[in-house]
């Protein structure tokens, strides 16, 4: 069943609890719009440096991580044009907005073999976030252990920098 744009707008409005949520949604939409172009033109390390915000001002009110995750899911759930869901887009959007909110998340990218039942198939890749050594806001958390991490950013978490 296809929903009209007006019905989709009504459903989206139900998820906005405050003007701050609307502002957050607009920023997520803006970044999600340019993200495919950025992925094609910048190396991943350069893109991640660009997506890593400066430290949050003390006392700044940050949106709750679950609210950020729900709005990112809503934007990618539009499943139109550049707003199609995939784990890399989701992880990059969450990485940026959660770091802006003061969360010390790390981006992980991993691969795994599809298994003997899929002989000849290409490797399977996945991107996810980690906080304090565990998958964070990850719908496939149970499967993360089957991936071999091939890239992480930042290489060391802030907690790792202590003497």
Image: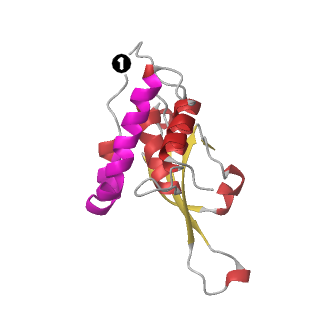
* Of the pair 37 and 50, the residue shown nearer to us: 37
Determine which quarter of the picture holds residue 45.
bottom left
- Label 1 SS: loop
Which is the main secondary structure of the residues drawn in magenta?
Answer: helix
Q: Which residue is mark 1?
A: 57
Q: How many marks?
A: 1
- Quadrant showing the N terminus: bottom right
Place of residue 68 in the rendered image (x, y in percent of width and height, measured from the top left): 51, 34
Q: Which residues are magenta?
A: 20-48
- Kindly tell me whether residue 101 is visible in this rendering: no
- For residue 147, side relative to residue 105 (left or right): right
* Of the pair 113 and 30, the residue shown nearer to us: 30
- Kindly tell me whether residue 129 is visible in this rendering: yes
* Of the pair 163 and 138, the residue shown nearer to us: 138
> Residue at image x 51%, y 52%?
108
- For residue 7, side relative to residue 116 (left or right): left
Residue that extends furthest to the top in the rendered view of this protein: 59
């Amino acid at each position: 069943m296809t929903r009209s744009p007006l019905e989709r707008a009504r459903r989206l409005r139900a998820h906005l609890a405050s003007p701050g949520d609307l502002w957050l949604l607009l920023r997520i939409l803006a970044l999600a719009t340019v993200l495919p172009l950025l992925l094609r033109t910048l190396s991943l390390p350069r893109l991640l440096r660009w997506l890593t915000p400066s430290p949050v001002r003390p006392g700044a009110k940050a949106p709750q991580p679950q609210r950020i995750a729900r709005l990112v899911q809503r934007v990618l759930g539009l499943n139109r044009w550049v707003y199609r869901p995939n784990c890399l887009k989701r992880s990059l959007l969450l990485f940026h907005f959660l770091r802006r909110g003061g969360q010390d998340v790390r981006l992980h990218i991993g691969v795994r073999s599809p298994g003997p039942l899929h002989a000849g198939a290409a490797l399977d890749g996945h991107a996810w976030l980690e906080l304090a050594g565990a998958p964070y806001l990850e719908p496939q958390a149970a499967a993360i252990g089957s991936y071999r991490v091939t890239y992480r950013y930042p290489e060391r978490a802030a907690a790792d920098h202590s003497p």
